[in-house]
């Protein structure tokens, strides 16, 4: 059954499909490189005009799950570093007026 994956992440995605799925069920997802992986339907996000969007999470946390989408995601260390960093605001001096 054709579906479109959106909001990709390293643990799953949101998928849009014109069929009703059961939350908690396991489906096989195939990417454009014909790699298949099992994923669990974790929630129904929307349903409008015959198109439903579901949140899925990979069941298999193995090598092909980490690179299933064919894109690189930040490592957990990179995410922690980004969330712990703070930006210090810089003040910009006002322009000088000539009298």
Image: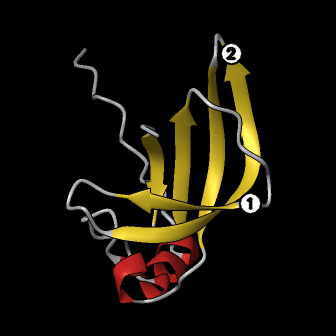
Q: Is residue 2 above or below residue 7?
A: above
**Badge 1: few (under 14), some or many (20 or more) residues near its Cα, within 10 Å?**
few
Q: Residue furthest top?
A: 49
Q: Position of residue 66 (x, y in %)?
A: 39, 79
Q: Is residue 13 above or below residue 87?
A: above
Please give left or right for residue 2 compared with residue 80 in the image: left
Q: Which mark is residue 25?
A: 1
Q: Disc 1 or disc 2, which is closer to the eye?
A: 1
- Between discs 1 and 2, the one toward the N terminus: 1
Q: Nearer the viewer, residue 53 or 85?
A: 53
Q: Is residue 11 visible?
A: no
Residue assigned mark 2: 48
Res 45 → quadrant: top right
Residue depicted at 22% across the width and 19% down the height: 98
Residues under numbered marks 1 and 2 in contact, where contact means CB atoms less than 8 Å apart: no
Q: Nearer the viewer, residue 85 or 79?
A: 79
Q: Position of residue 46 (x, y in %)?
A: 71, 29
Res 67 → quadrant: bottom left
Q: Secondary structure at mark 2?
A: strand
In the rendered image, which quarter contains the C terminus? top left
Residue depicted at 65% across the width and 43% down the height: 54
**Badge 2: few (under 14), some or many (20 or more) residues near its Cα, within 10 Å?**
few
Q: Position of residue 48 (x, y in %)?
A: 68, 15
Q: Secondary structure at mark 1?
A: loop
Residue depicted at 45% across the width and 42% down the height: 6
Q: Position of residue 5 (x, y in %)?
A: 44, 44
């Amino acid at each position: 059954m054709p579906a479109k994956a959106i909001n990709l992440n390293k643990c799953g995605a949101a998928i849009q499909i014109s069929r009703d799925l059961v939350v908690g069920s396991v489906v096989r997802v195939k990417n454009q490189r014909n790699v298949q992986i099992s994923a669990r339907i974790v929630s129904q996000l929307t349903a409008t005009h015959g198109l439903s969007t579901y949140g899925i999470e990979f069941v298999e946390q193995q090598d092909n799950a980490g690179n299933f989408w064919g894109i690189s995601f930040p490592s957990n260390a990179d995410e922690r570093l980004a969330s712990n960093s703070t930006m210090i605001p810089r003040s910009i001096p006002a322009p000088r007026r000539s009298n």
